[in-house]
Image (cartoon, grey):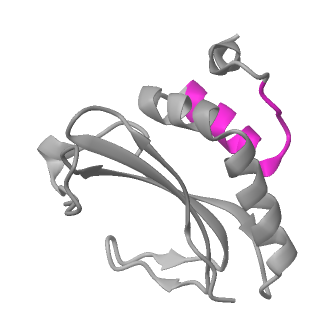
């Protein structure tokens, strides 16, 4: 069950990168807001500060550092772990990584709805990421 979480990394600027992760979470307490996190397959998008040529990266946390499209989404709720569900979501993210990065960069409600549709497999974008917004 120990699989690599990182699916795709994209350099947004000379100092920032966005990483797309897919992972299984057994649920429990969410230590950020103390809510109960359900068990299932999750997608997360995280922005790090990492200058070009550096091996060190830092996650900036706080109200002023909020980037659009950063956070996690429960894609497949589960009662028991299913590796096939994890592989399917991971394959969708690998296939549509550039379109997902474009949607995360916008970060509004409509683009997050399209992102959820891509992750669940109900919508398949065209080859060009510009067509995602059509």
Task: Using residue 120 as the reference point, say whether residue 63 is left or right of it.
Answer: left
Look at 40% across and 46% down and name the residue there. Answer: 18
In x, y percent, where is residue 20?
Answer: 52, 53
Q: Can you say which quadrant of the picture contains the C terminus? A: top right
Placement of 58 over or under 12, stated as above or below: below
**Is 126 one of the magenta-colored residues?**
no
Look at 83% across and 45% down and name the residue there. Answer: 121
In x, y percent, where is residue 70?
Answer: 40, 47
* Viewer-closest of 111 and 132: 132
* Viewer-closest of 11 and 18: 11
Q: Residue furthest top?
A: 134
Placement of 46 over or under 68, stated as above or below: below
Task: Using residue 4 as the reference point, say whether residue 41 is left or right of it.
Answer: right
User: Quadrant of the rendered structure where residue 131 is?
Assistant: top right
Q: Can you say which quadrant of the picture contains the N terminus? A: bottom right
Q: Residue furthest front?
A: 53
User: Quadrant of the rendered structure where residue 103 is?
Assistant: top right
* Viewer-closest of 81 and 14: 14
Give the overall secondary structure of the magenta segment: helix
Look at 18% across and 57% down and name the residue there. Answer: 61
In x, y percent, where is residue 7?
Answer: 59, 58
In x, y percent, where is residue 97?
Answer: 62, 41
**Is 123 one of the magenta-colored residues?**
yes
User: Quadrant of the rendered structure where residue 31 is?
Assistant: bottom left
Magenta stretch bounds:
110-125
Look at 23% across and 62% down and name the residue there. Answer: 55
């Amino acid at each position: 069950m120990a699989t690599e979480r990182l699916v795709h990394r994209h350099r947004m600027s000379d100092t920032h990168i966005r990483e797309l992760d897919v992972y299984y979470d057994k649920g429990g307490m969410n230590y950020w807001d103390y809510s109960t996190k359900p068990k299932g397959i999750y997608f997360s998008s995280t922005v790090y500060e990492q200058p070009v040529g550096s091996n060190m990266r830092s996650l900036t946390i706080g109200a002023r550092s909020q980037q659009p499209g950063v956070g996690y989404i429960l894609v497949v709720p589960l009662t028991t772990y299913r590796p096939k569900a994890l592989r399917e979501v991971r394959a969708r993210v690998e296939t549509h990584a550039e379109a997902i990065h474009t949607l995360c960069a916008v970060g509004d409600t409509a683009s997050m709805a399209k992102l959820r549709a891509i992750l669940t497999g109900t919508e398949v974008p065209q080859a060009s990421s510009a067509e995602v917004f059509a």
